[in-house]
Amino acid sequence: MTNPTRNKSEFISVLREFLSHGLLDKGEVVRWADKEIAAADQPDDYLIGLSLTGTKTTNEVIDLLGSFMEETRSLSTGRAIIGLTWGLIKTKAVDYKKGMEVIYAANLQFPLGDIESKFIYQADSGLDLAVQNIWGEQGELEKEIAGFLGCYEGFSFDNADDWDRLAMEVDNKLDTWIHAGGRTTPKDV
């Protein structure tokens, strides 16, 4: 992770979401803050606050991050969460089910486009049914989800200063995906 020079509130918001969903652990965040403090001439207040949370619970760290956030409900933040979660799914750090739970929560909290919201809602519901062997084929649904999530490729904790640009590129990638046969609703749903 790299401390962004701008979009700090968006970055903090994403850290908070990832901690809330268990995609990052408190220790990782504290170690990262310590590293950033050591490299900075004048570290940001939130980094100092995070560095001092070693004995705090994860929920206390989440609350602390919330106190450093400005109200951030941006398209870039929502799309960054999707892209970062896709990175974890691809590396098998989380499975599709957990990843879609995080993405579904981001869809409820951050403004996304209509196509995105519709696909996420349908994919999350469909995956729930497929995992329980109620309806649909899980493997096929995961392939469709992967095609959709591939539009969010490129987001990382090390390029937070580029999240606005990457978020704008998603629209073109979604159009390309749809024109290549991607569905706005998974076929098994």
Image (cartoon, rainbow, N blue to C red):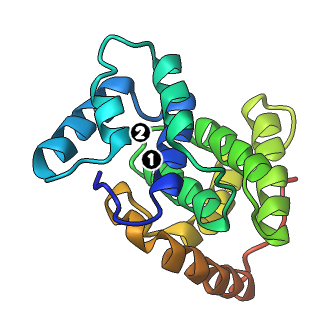
Neighbour class for label 1 at 10 Å: few (<14), some, many (≥20)?
some
Q: Secondary structure at mark 1?
A: helix
Which residue corresponds to mark 1? 88
Q: Are marks 2 and 1 in contact (CB under 8 Å)?
A: yes
Q: Nearer the viewer, residue 64 or 129?
A: 64
Q: CA distance from mark 2 to mark 1?
A: 5 Å
Instruction: Judge left or right: residue 57 versus residue 128.
Output: left
Element type at mark 2: loop
Q: Quadrant of residue 102?
A: top right
Measured as percent of width and height from the top left, residue 188 is found at 84, 54
The residue depicted at 72 percent of the width and 33 percent of the height is: 131
Q: Which residue is mark 2?
A: 93
Residue 122: x and y, percent? 84, 53
Question: In the rendered view, would you say 166 is above or below 71?
Answer: below
Up/down of 111 relative to 40, above or below:
below
**What amino acid type is highlighted by mark number 2?**
Ala
Residue 16 in the image: x percent, y percent?
A: 52, 38
Q: Residue 134 versus residue 14: which sits nearer the camera?
A: 14
The answer to whether residue 107 is visible is yes
Dot 2 or dot 1: first in sequence order is 1
Residue at x 66%, y 50% (from the top left corner): 71
Check disc 2: other Cα within 10 Å, few if <14, some if 14-19, many if 20+. Answer: some
How far across and how far down the image is residue 185, in percent? Answer: 84, 64
In this rendering, the answer to whether 7 lies above or below 57 is: below
In this orientation, which residue lies closer to the viewer: 10 or 71? 71
